[in-house]
Amino acid sequence: MLYNTTPDSLFVPQSSVVDPLGYGKVALVTGCGSGIGLAVTQLLLAHQFQVCGLDVVEFDYNLVREADHGRFHFHRGDLVAPGVCEEGVRICVATYGPRIDVLVNVAGVMDNFSSADGVSDQVWDRVMAVNLTAPVKMMRSVIPFMRPKRSGVIINVASTAAISGAVAGIAYTSSKHGLIGATKNVAWRFRNDGIRCNAVLPGAIDSSIGKMIHEGKRSSEAGGAYDEEAYAEVQPVHALQTRPSTATPSITPLEVAKSILFLISDQARTINGVSLPVDEAWGVI
Ligand SMILES: NC(=O)c1ccc[n+]([C@@H]2O[C@H](COP(=O)([O-])OP(=O)(O)OC[C@H]3O[C@@H](n4cnc5c(N)ncnc54)[C@H](O)[C@@H]3O)[C@@H](O)[C@H]2O)c1
């Protein structure tokens, strides 16, 4: 289904006019296959960007409007595997030419809420590799295309867990805190090269990760059953954001995508190095 977050579906601009936001520009999106990454992909395509999407699972082209197919290229790969981040950038350049205007690092995995006394090597390594190492490798690979043009925008999708120790396990929390550090470092280092780097910090989102937590699924895609003792400590904090009357989190992937689009746009020209919560004030607790 297209734009399945219906309250926002009216964002689709007229395709008959040139959209200065995206026309002629190239964006690379990781984790494009579902949730926030899919919404970002759909929104960028609607604004006439050419999009190269990367994901570890096969992409369902029915999720992209037929009219946008010519401006969308998908490459399948596990960003954790050696050389895959670099390969994704190479494929983007081979498809659209030697320019990358935007990188949105969305791909991420949740942990199993395990703590410092019990986190397995498998969970720690996988979560750090997907959530922190891959985004840094993606930034390393695109910056050489942005510096010569003296323009480029990078958005890293972090989490409330990037500023709170009370909403996830140690691996996810550390990976997202680390991603904020990487965001700030890139923002400062390349501020005079016309490159901006910002992060968004979603709260619980109505996506597969958000639903998994909300519906109490008791295992993580990074491996391992939930650490129930640790989960019992974070669950009351999660309950402060979710509304008892709703079956799923109330923030949609498209709402996160819209905040990303704002940071990409020239309206955010002076905004660099920030961590923008998209969480209905959850992060202020
Ligand atoms: N859902 C939430 O409640 C929530 C809250 C805060 C932050 N986030 C963050 O938002 C981002 C997107 O999450 P989502 O909720 O849309 O989840 P999602 O599971 O719907 O989407 C994540 C996508 O990343 C892809 N992916 C995972 N590992 C990959 C790998 N190794 N290589 C390539 N692709 C890979 C998945 O296949 C999937 O398509 C993540 O970074 C997540 O940490 C999510």
Image: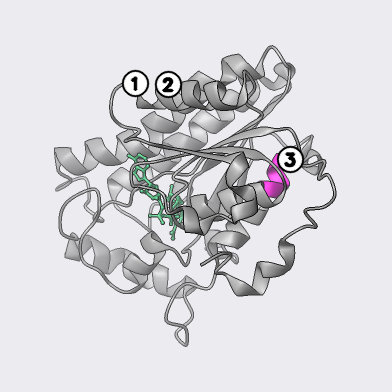
Q: Is residue 65 left or right of residue 234?
A: right
Which residue matches tag 1?
A: 83
Callout 2: CB less than 8 Å from ligand 1: no
Say whether disc 3 or disc 1 marks the residue closer to the N-terminus: 3
Dot 2 lies on which element? helix
Earlier-in-chain disc, 3 versus 2:
3
- According to the picture, the residue beneath numbered tag 3 turns out to be 22
Number of dots carrying numbers: 3
Residue kind at label 3, given as amino acid type: Gly
Tell me residue 171's x, y (percent).
Answer: 29, 44
Q: Is residue 261 above or below residue 208?
A: above
Q: Residue at x 45, y 32 (%)?
A: 135
Tag 2 residue: 86
* 26 w.r.t. 141: above or below: below
Image coordinates of residue 118 in percent, x first then y, are 14, 48
Q: Which residue corresponds to the image point at 21% horizontal and 66% vertical from the top-left?
A: 218
Instruction: Give the quadrant of residue 99.
Output: top right
Q: Are marks 2 and 1 in contact (CB under 8 Å)?
A: yes
Q: Amino acid at mark 2?
A: Glu
Q: Residue at x 44, y 55 (%)?
A: 34
Q: Amino acid at mark 1?
A: Gly
Residue, far bottom:
245
User: Is 139 left, or right, of 190 in this rendering?
Assistant: left
Res. 278 in view: no
The magenta segment: 260-264
Query: Distance of mark 3 from mark 1, alpha carbons?
Result: 28 Å
